Amino acid sequence: MPFEFLSDEQIARYGRFPEEPSAAELEQFFRLDRRALDALASKRRPVTKLGWAVQWGTVRLLGVFLTDDPLAVPPGVVAFVAEQLGLDPAHFADYGQRQQTVYEHAWEIRELLGYRDFGSCESEVRQYVSARVWASAEGPRALFDRARVHMLKERILLPGMTVLVRLVGEVRRAENERLHALLSGRLSAEMRAALMGLLAVPDGKRRSELERLRTAPTKASGRVLAEELRRVAEIAELGAGQVATDPVPAVKLGALPVMGWRPRRARCGIWQPIGRARRCWLRCGTWRPPRSMTPWTCWIC
């Protein structure tokens, strides 16, 4: 599945180390506490001690165990941990020669710190993302980061990036559909017909009534002010402001106009031929995509 809404930075840092963690991150995640030192007391070989301690800090920082490539750790991390144990950082190069040891360490650390699999906590993560979607106007990138931080805080092992991307997309889509169903279900038949009528383009006109009502003036004068007051009165007569919006949060209502007109690449499937161009009835704007695009795609809807 493509990571269409993630930035390159988000992709690069998911479950991976940055070039070198900061001094604060080293102190926060790789400073060995009493429980870690007690667990290390049973380890004999320097490479085993060093590898276990690095994995202990890795899962706390990244939310994953580097079992497939346990040596993919910045040198500064290894040096910081080795200094605490009084060991030579060069011992770490031999870690992972026995793959079973790496997995055994991961299971031991998981039990020690109380980490949980994503599969058993997926519903919890979905509920968290759902609450964020409902109560905020955050986009998918911010929701992805929020979900990742939440799992780190709650000690849930991160899933594959594709899994989390799909989860954020599904939850966001479901919550937006729930919001649409809630608000549209409160419209009367007359108001619904009036709003749908705004999408029609009157005879002899080049734009719909909705486009006319939403277009802001470009000049400032007394006549323009009078026209704008009449436009405001027309909008008020539609009665949309009388629709009960509880329990939708105010921040969500404020974001609806932006969400409704943000360009998105999705097929609306409602086209009317107009000469060599085509008109999208949902936005009533005339667009001429490249001829190679089949079927025609509205870049607004």
Image (cartoon, grey):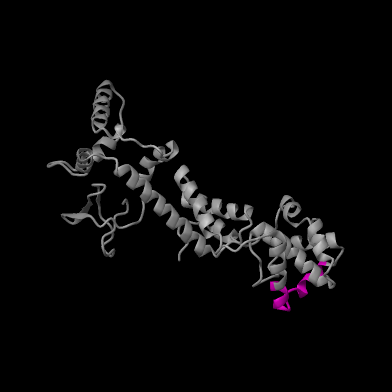
Percent position of residue 126, x then y: 50, 55
The span shown in magenta is: 89-103
| Nearest the eye: 7 or 224 | 7
Residue 222 against residue 181 in the figure, above or below:
above
Asked if residue 261 shows in the view, the reply is no
Q: Quadrant of residue 197?
A: top left
Left or right: residue 267 versus residue 1 is: left
Magenta segment: does it hold 146? no
Which picture quadrant has residue 41? Answer: bottom right
Q: Residue furthest bottom?
A: 98
Q: Which residue does the image show at 33% across and 42% down from the upper left? A: 183
Q: Residue furthest left?
A: 203
Q: Tell me: 252 left or right of 84.
A: left
Give the residue displayed 23% in from the left and 39% down from the top. Answer: 188
Measured as percent of width and height from the top left, residue 73 is found at 70, 65
Most extreme residue toward the right is 86
Question: Residue 125: x percent and y percent?
Answer: 53, 55
Depth order, front residue of 251/82 = 251
When asked about the image quadrant of residue 107, the answer is: bottom right
Q: Position of residue 223 (x, y in %)?
A: 24, 23
Residue positioned 22% across, 38% down in the render? 191
Height in image: 167 above or below 187?
Answer: below
Q: Taking the image as drawn, is residue 77 in sight? A: yes
Is residue 98 on the magenta stretch? yes
Principal secondary structure, stretch drawn in magenta: helix
Label tally: 0
Q: Quadrant of the N terminus?
A: bottom left
Q: Is residue 33 left or right of residue 168?
A: right
